Image: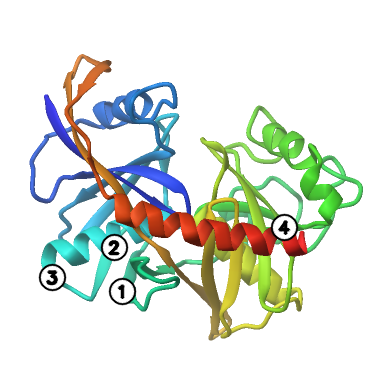
């Protein structure tokens, strides 16, 4: 089997994009899971946080399915959606499109560069739910908004929401960010535990300057990542609801992978979030494998997008300077 792969990233959150619009690979569900486990291994020649299967849709311009490095399927991925948005818009010559995801059909569009010569796309993050049953979170209440969970921490206040991926978010101090607290909490709620039967993404927020926050995320099925798009979006909304930032205004969100902008909107008592950031191509390559033994794959020659990576390094350097100054 020969598979054409596009290595790409959003905010340093890296993916292998496989085009099933132009090519009919005929993957089974088990093959998708096995491919994610085989190709995303960090000790392999590829390595990634997940695979973006870009597919035809009966009701939208395209469909995105996301498989994490551990073979599990994510209901959404904001950073991945930006990469799929660019790919689909360029494939069909569009400036905006609708992408079908597991829980919703989402608007995407090309936007002015967030940093010089950085391909930038806006993607819609929705639906948003604060009902803890939608994560699910097992507590004897309907919502959890800026409240303690004593079994996790005696000092932190957590907010739980689904966007639609499940997120547990806390506003933290510099000391909290630099400690093992997030690691310990994240590993607990993503192993056998009494609160989150399906695991959860865990984010710590540290306010920086005005209309700027730093977000660090332990992603379910992945571990600590450079950035998680839905986590940055959910964290922006939480920061607005707690008075640190304002709805309908852009918030600069810094992370270990760089920077995005998010805008949280309220309408008729509900929320949506715009996630705006890079969609950077790293290289193209063909992978060759026996479908019965996907781990034993070989690669052709990689075709690098060197100028895109160089420009993104400049954005990372800028983000790093801001984080060091305020964190």
Q: What residue lies at 60% left-to-right and 75% top-to-bottom?
A: 251
Q: CA distance from mark 1 to mark 4?
A: 32 Å
Q: What residue lies at 86% left-to-right and 49% top-to-bottom?
A: 175
Q: CA distance from mark 4 to mark 2?
A: 31 Å
Quadrant in the picture for the C terminus: bottom right
Determine which residue is flagged by label 2. 85
Determine which residue is flagged by label 3. 93
Determine which residue is flagged by label 4. 324
- Kindly report which numbered mark, 4 or 2, lies closer to the viewer in this rendering: 4
Mark 3 or mark 4: whose residue is earlier in sequence: 3
Crowd around label 1: few <14 · some 14–19 · many ≥20 (10 Å) = some
Q: CA distance from mark 2 to mark 3?
A: 11 Å
Quadrant in the picture for the N terminus: top left
Q: Position of residue 196 (x, y in %)?
A: 65, 40
Crowd around label 4: few <14 · some 14–19 · many ≥20 (10 Å) = few
In the rendered structure, the answer to whether residue 312 lies left or right of residue 22 reads: right
Numbered circle sitting on residue 126:
none
Q: Position of residue 165 (x, y in %)?
A: 51, 52
Q: What residue lies at 22% left-to-right and 35% top-to-bottom?
A: 302
Determine which residue is flagged by label 1. 109
Residue contact at pointers 2 and 1, CB within 8 angstroms = yes
Out of 66 and 275, give the one closest to the viewer. 275
């Amino acid at each position: 089997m020969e598979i054409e792969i596009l290595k790409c990233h959003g905010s340093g959150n890296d993916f292998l994009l496989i085009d099933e619009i132009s090519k009919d690979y005929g993957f089974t569900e088990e093959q998708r899971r096995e491919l994610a486990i085989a190709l995303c291994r960090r000790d392999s020649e590829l390595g990634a946080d997940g695979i973006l299967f870009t597919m035809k849709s009966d009701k939208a311009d395209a469909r995105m399915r996301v498989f994490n490095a551990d073979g599990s399927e994510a209901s959404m991925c904001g950073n991945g959606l930006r990469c799929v948005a660019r790919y689909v818009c360029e494939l069909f010559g569009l400036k905006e499109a609708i992408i079908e995801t597991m829980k919703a059909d989402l608007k995407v569009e090309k936007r002015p560069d967030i940093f010089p010569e950085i391909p930038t796309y806006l993607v819609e993050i929705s639906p948003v739910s604060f009902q803890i049953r939608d994560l699910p979170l097992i507590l004897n209440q309907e919502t959890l908004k800026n409240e303690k969970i004593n079994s996790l921490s005696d000092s932190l206040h957590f907010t739980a929401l689904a966007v639609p991926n499940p997120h547990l978010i806390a506003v933290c101090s510099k000391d909290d960010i630099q400690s093992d607290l997030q690691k310990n909490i994240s590993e607990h709620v993503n192993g056998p535990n009494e609160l989150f039967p399906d695991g959860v993404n865990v984010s710590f927020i540290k306010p920086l300057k005005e209309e700027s926050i730093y977000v660090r995320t332990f992603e379910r099925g992945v571990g600590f990542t450079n950035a998680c798009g839905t986590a940055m979006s959910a964290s922006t909304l939480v920061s607005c609801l707690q008075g640190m930032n304002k709805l309908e205004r852009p918030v600069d969100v810094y992370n270990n992978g760089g920077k995005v902008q998010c805008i949280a909107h309220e309408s008729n008592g509900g929320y949506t979030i715009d996630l705006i950031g890079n969609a950077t191509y790293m290289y193209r390559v063909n992978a060759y494998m026996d479908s019965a033994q996907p781990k034993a794959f070989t690669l052709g020659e990689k075709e690098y997008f060197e100028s895109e990576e160089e420009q993104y390094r400049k954005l990372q350097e800028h983000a790093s300077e801001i984080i060091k100054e305020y964190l």
